[in-house]
Image: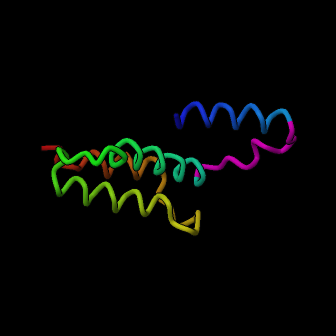
Amino acid sequence: MFHGYFAWQVREELLFKEDFLAEFTPESNIAAFAKLFLSVCFDDNNESLPHHLVKDARQLIERCRAEDPKSRPTMENVVKEMETWNLT
């Protein structure tokens, strides 16, 4: 659903707004990633996720959704952090 909405939004914005692509920044992409990650991990109350992984994921999502876009991590930092997670 997220992908479909995003595709629709891009199409609509491109049709009606000249400077639409200027609104997409690395910081806004991190926030969009956080929304998708939150949905994938927690929308179904996935109780099979290890407790420590839930804590790590929630903390990362919160940092990615920081109110100040400049406070959000880069995607490179996100990937590096996730690579350190114990997935068992």
Colouring? rainbow
Viewer-proximal residue among 24 and 2: 2
Q: Is residue 43 left or right of residue 88?
A: right
Viewer-proximal residue among 35 and 86: 35
Residue 27 rendering spot, x and y as whole percentages: 58, 54
Residue 47 rendering spot, x and y as whole percentages: 20, 48
**Magenta highlight range:** 16-26
Viewer-proximal residue among 8 and 75: 8
Write the residue at 43% across / 47% down. Answer: 76
Write the residue at 28% across / 48% down. Answer: 45
Residue 87 rendering spot, x and y as whole percentages: 17, 44
Write the residue at 52% across / 34% down. Answer: 1
Q: How many marks on residues?
A: 0
Viewer-proximal residue among 38 and 20: 38
Q: Quadrant of the C terminus?
A: top left
Q: Is residue 44 left or right of residue 48?
A: right
Q: Is residue 47 left or right of residue 10?
A: left
Q: Please, is residue 3 above or below residue 36 in the view?
A: above
Q: Is residue 87 left or right of residue 82?
A: left
Q: Is residue 27 magenta?
A: no
Query: Furthest-front residue in view?
Result: 44
Residue 34 rendering spot, x and y as whole percentages: 46, 51
